[in-house]
Amino acid sequence: MGRPTSIKTSEEVRDRLRVLAAERGTTITELLEELASRELTDAEREQRAVEAAAELGIDYSEQVQHAGQDAWAKIRAHQGGATA
């Protein structure tokens, strides 16, 4: 772990993080590390899409990129998440 720092958030978010960490038997710091490492950056998502297309023998064109983005937006919408 790097040098400790602080993150400003609302009391409601802090309390929720505390409950989630306690339910998992961990600390808020470890919970945040897990959540941050689980989420991909845009660049990481793009690289994985390129690699997946190559494995499938598909040319990763702009059209394929947009079709994939549209598909994920629909999936997130059905899961109750934000659309891209």
Image: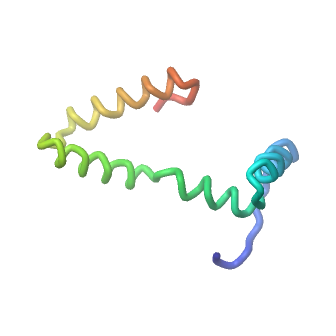
Q: Quadrant of residue 5?
A: bottom right
For the point 31% across and 33% down, the residue is 68
Q: Is residue 2 left or right of residue 73?
A: right
Instruction: Tell me if residue 53 comes above or below residue 84 in the rendering.
Output: below
Q: Residue furthest bottom?
A: 3
Nearer-the-camera pick, 77 or 34: 34
Q: Quadrant of residue 82?
A: top right
For the point 86% across and 47% down, the residue is 15
Q: Is residue 32 left or right of residue 14?
A: left
Nearer-the-camera pick, 57 or 42: 57
Q: Position of residue 52 (x, y in %)?
A: 25, 46
Q: Position of residue 60 (x, y in %)?
A: 18, 43
Quadrant in which the N terminus is drawn: bottom right
Q: Is residue 58 left or right of residue 32?
A: left
Instruction: Tell me if residue 4 comes above or below residue 58 in the rendering.
Output: below
Q: Count of labels shown?
A: 0
Nearer-the-camera pick, 37 or 73: 37
Q: How is the image coloured?
A: rainbow
Q: Position of residue 19 (x, y in %)?
A: 82, 46
Q: Is residue 53 left or right of residue 28?
A: left
Nearer-the-camera pick, 16 or 25: 25
For the point 50% across and 23% down, the residue is 77
Instruction: Tell me if residue 6 comes above or below residue 45 in the rendering.
Output: below
For the point 78% across and 49% down, the residue is 17
Q: Position of residue 18 (x, y in %)?
A: 83, 51
